[in-house]
Amino acid sequence: HNGELWIGTKHYGLAKITDEGVEKFDERNAGFAIQQYIAGIYFDSDGGMLVGGLTALYRFDGKRCTDSYEINIISPFTYVTSIKADASGRVWVSCYDAQGRATLCLFTQEGLVPISHPYGSISRIETDDKGCLWLASEAGLIKFDGTNFTPYTPDNSDLPEYTLNDIK
């Protein structure tokens, strides 16, 4: 992003890589929870960031966490797997918990609003030019138009398998 590479780590927060080197952001200097697992990084239109971690979604200004939103909405030890905005500017967050339950959430200024779905873990979210979300899940490829979910699986399409890890 803007000549910088941002990396989420399993135990030590966030890092920014530039031509000058690596700058680390963790509980000591940036306000993340201790030993923070970072899996989702999203840049908004104003240049700010949302950073998904274990138990929280953080608003990050490039140096420090400026706000955090609780994501333990389904159980303790929930973590973010993906963050993406749709064509309307709504920000969507996929979460997963230690008990294997997944949740798709809409991010609002008040926090995360869970959206019920029966498709298991969502590993990644992508959008199309029509504003639909495409979800890579353990139940196949799922299209969400904001109201309805449409699954694409090996049973109803040429998809090679059910479990999908990524989508671009």
Image (cartoon, rainbow, N blue to C red):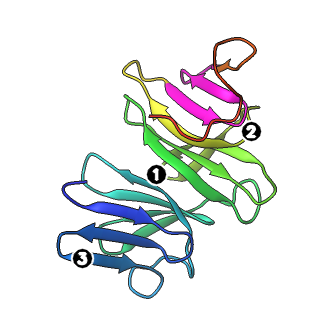
The kind of secondary structure element at disc 1 is loop
- Disc 2 crowd, CA 10 A, few/some/many (<14, 14-19, 20+): some
Name the residue located 40 percent from the left edge and 64 percent from the top edge: 7
Counting from the top left corner in percent of width and height, residue 103 is at 68, 44
Counting from the top left corner in percent of width and height, residue 127 is at 44, 29
Which tag is nearer the camera, tag 2 or tag 1? 2
Task: State the image quarter where residue 128 is shown.
Answer: top left
Residue type (three-letter) at the residue carrying disc 3: Gly
Please determine whether, in this image, residue 108 is positioned above or below residue 97: above
Name the residue beneath numbered marker 3.
21
Range shown magenta:
133-149
Q: Which residue is the extreme one toward the top?
A: 156
Q: What secondary structure predominates along the stretch shown in magenta?
A: strand
Counting from the top left corner in percent of width and height, residue 6 is at 34, 62
Of callouts 1 and 3, the N-terminal one = 3
Name the residue beneath numbered marker 1.
109
Of callouts 2 and 1, the N-terminal one = 1
Q: Nearer the viewer, residue 163 or 88?
A: 163
Name the residue beneath numbered marker 2.
120
